[in-house]
Structures are given as C-alpha cells and as structure tokens.
C-alpha cells in the first residue's frame, strides 16, 4: 500500500440513494440504493480501474468523486481535507484538483461554442488577459495533439476522437491532479479508442496525473489499470492489483465477468478461471437482495449468503473480496 502522503483522493463509506416515482400525494414510493458504502484510495500517478455491469453505480460514484453530486453519506477526502464537510465542493481548489471526462463528447460539448470558446470557459476563474488566454488555449490543444487551427472549429465539424480530445483539454485547463474518466472511449470507433488511451497514458506521465478509469471493458482495464475494482449493486465486491484480479479472481461475480471476456489465443483461454455461468440479470437497486447481494445469481450460494452480508476478506497484496466462500470457518 502507498503511504498516506501519496494519497491524492480517498473515499470512505460513500452512500447515495435516489427517490423513485412519487405518488400523487407527493410521497416517495421507495428508494434506489445506488451506493451502499463505497471506500477507495487513489495514489499519486495511479490508474484505479472501476468495472461492473451497467446499473451497478459506477457513474454515480464518479460524479461524487468529481464533486458534481453530494453523497447522502460517507466522506470524500482530497489531500486529507473533507471535501463536503468543509463546504469546499464549489471552491476553486476542488475544481482545480478533480475533473471528470464523460463517455459521449457529442453531448458534453456545447454545439454553439468553438473549441477555443469551450476551452476558455474554465480559464475564466483565472482572470487572464486575452493574450494569455489564447496562449493557454493553444497550449491545451497541443497537449491533446490537436492543431491550433481547431480553436476556431465547432463540434459538428470534429470527429468523435477529436471531440473527446477537446473534452480532455477542457478537463486539463486548470491543471487538475485527478481525472475521473467515465467510459472515455466507449462511444468511439475501435481504431480511435487505442489512440485516446495512448494519449491518456502519455498525459499521466507527462503531467503526473491520477485516474479513476470507469469502464465495462475488461481488456482495457487489464492493459492500463494499476488496480482493478469490481462494483456490484453499489458496493466494491472485489479489488486488488490488476494482475491478481485477472489471474486469481476470488469473487464469483468477478469470475463471471472475466469468463465473458474474449480471448485471442488458446493459452489465454487456458488461463481463464473455470466458467462461472451467470444466472439471471442484475436486479434493480430498488430491490437489493438480502445478505450478499449477488447470492440470487451465484452458482456457489450457501444458506449463509442470503442471510448475512459477507465481510471484506483480505487475499494478500491488497486484494480483497466480499464473499462468504473465502471466510475462514467460525468467522462468518
Ligand atoms: N439522478 C438519478 N436519479 C434516479 N436514479 C438514478 C440517477 N442516477 C442514476 N440512477 C440509477 O442508479 C443506478 C446506477 O446508475 P449508474 O451510476 O449510472 O450506473 P452505471 O454507471 O454503473 O451504469 C441505475 O439504476 C440508475 O437508473
Ligand atoms: Mg455509467
């Protein structure tokens, strides 16, 4: 584990719920429990991968980590300071430290602004002179490998990859330390995806950035994340150094996800964990199953699994899994 001074961001027990459809009388009919106690630590220069099926709460977590939404419970610490407790969430310090990049650059860029105008928005807080502002815009375009002439172009004239470069440049405008990347390549053509990933890796070393990389693409995770975590119904059910997660997944849910990843060679196929066949689909967060929330879909479920939430069982080298299978007898 890294020493506390290496930590740029940490989350402790984050909770988030959304009210579902209100009745005519205005009463809330129920709650979606989307985050149910999520903790994580992000070290300087690290890529922390967050995987899991659609609906597991990844984007909700990303928005809280980026300070866009306030959680219902738990704490977010930036450089040791409690972000929401200190009412810092709208402060310059926060905006400068953490930025988010969304999946679809077409909807995250304003179609009526040129690239230059888009990049100038975050720079407004710096109250730069016009010359300094355009110099910074040119610098940002250069960082994301776009020709300066793109400053005058509107999003409609840019390709998907170019738009995502502009979104990235905008996120970098105030020199953040952390980027929350929410499926940053999922909306792009395969050939473009690799170029954006290469750019992200270069920017990380050049600028000393840390990333929370949200993706359901496990091959990407395997290639770029230092640590990988797996979310299921609002909890991180397994996390650890990426090679350990891919070579020795401990949670049946992680095993199920990995069994579905396509492999290129028979050698890779042989290394895969024994096939764990998924049962059914991910339930709605309005009906979280009792005990281990994965138990209705788990081929190894035991009586205890529907009864008690499993503890996080350490597996060595920082890997843990929330599963009763790994709990030593007598501890459950
Ligand atoms: N603002 C919101 N209001 C109500 N429900 C929401 C809101 N945001 C997300 N949800 C619900 O929370 C669950 C998790 O969503 P999300 O965080 O987007 O998951 P993921 O990114 O893993 O696909 C989903 O069931 C989604 O419908
Ligand atoms: Mg999402």
Image (cartoon, helix red, strand yellow):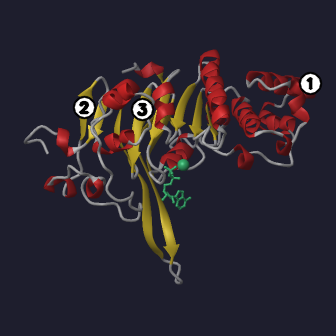
In the image, residue 207 sits, relative to residue 167, either above or below, namely above
In the image, residue 268 sits, relative to residue 183, either above or below, namely above
Residues at marks 1 and 2 touching, judged by CB atoms closer than 8 Å:
no
Instruction: Choose mark 3 or mark 2, whichever is in front.
Output: 3
The residue under the point 14% across, 45% down is: 332
As rendered, which of 8 and 102 lies closer to the eye? 102
Q: Earlier in the sequence, mark 3 or mark 2?
A: 3
Q: Is residue 255 left or right of residue 212?
A: left
Q: Quadrant of the N terminus?
A: top left
Q: Which mark is residue 314?
A: 2
Give the residue at the far front of this rendering: 266
Can residue 138 be spotted in the picture?
yes
Measured Cα–Cα span from mark 3 to mark 2: 15 Å
Instruction: Choose mark 1 or mark 2, whichever is in front.
Output: 2
Q: Earlier in the sequence, mark 1 or mark 2?
A: 1
In what element is the residue under mark 1?
A: helix
Residue 162 image point, x, y percent = 76, 34
Query: Which residue corresponds to mark 1?
Result: 131
The residue under the point 67% across, 46% down is: 104
Residue 254 image point, x, y percent = 34, 41
Q: Is residue 133 left or right of residue 229?
A: right
Q: Is residue 12 left or right of residue 135?
A: left
Query: Which residue corresponds to mark 3?
Result: 228
Give the residue at the far bottom of this rendering: 24
Quarter of the rendering containing residue 144? top right
Can residue 241 be spotted in the picture?
no
In what element is the residue under mark 3?
A: strand
As rendered, which of 94 and 313 lies closer to the eye? 313
């Amino acid at each position: 584990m890294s020493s506390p001074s290496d930590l740029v961001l940490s989350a402790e027990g984050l909770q988030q719920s959304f009210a579902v459809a209100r009745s005519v009388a205005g009463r809330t009919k129920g709650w979606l429990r989307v985050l149910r106690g999520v903790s994580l630590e992000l070290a300087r220069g690290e890529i922390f991968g967050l995987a899991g099926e659609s609906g597991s709460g990844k984007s909700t977590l990303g928005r809280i980590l980026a300070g866009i939404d306030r959680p219902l419970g738990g704490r977010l610490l930036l450089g040791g300071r409690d972000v929401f407790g200190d009412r810092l969430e709208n402060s310059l310090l926060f905006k400068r430290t953490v930025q988010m990049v969304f999946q679809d650059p077409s909807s995250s860029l304003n179609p009526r602004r040129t690239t230059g105008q888009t990049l100038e928005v975050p720079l407004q807080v710096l109250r730069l002179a016009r010359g300094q502002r355009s110099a910074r815009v040119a610098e940002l375009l250069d960082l994301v490998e776009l020709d300066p002439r793109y400053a005058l172009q509107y999003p409609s004239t840019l390709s998907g990859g170019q738009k995502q470069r502009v979104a990235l440049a905008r996120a970098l405008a105030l020199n953040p330390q952390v980027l929350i990347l929410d499926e940053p390549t999922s909306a792009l053509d395969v050939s473009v995806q690799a170029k954006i990933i290469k750019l992200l890796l270069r920017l990380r070393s050049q600028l000393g950035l840390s990333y929370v990389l949200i993706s359901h693409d496990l091959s990407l995770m395997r290639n770029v994340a230092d640590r990988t975590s797996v979310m299921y119904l609002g909890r991180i059910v397994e996390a650890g150094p990426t090679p350990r997660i891919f070579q020795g997944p401990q949670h049946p849910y992680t095993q199920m996800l990995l069994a579905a990843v396509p492999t290129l060679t028979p050698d890779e196929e042989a290394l895969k964990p024994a096939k764990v066949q998924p049962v059914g689909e991910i339930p709605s967060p309005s009906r979280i199953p009792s005990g281990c929330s994965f138990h209705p879909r788990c081929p190894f479920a035991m009586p205890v699994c529907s009864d008690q939430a499993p503890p996080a069982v350490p597996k060595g080298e920082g890997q843990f899994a929330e599963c009763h299978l790994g709990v030593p007898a007598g501890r459950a």
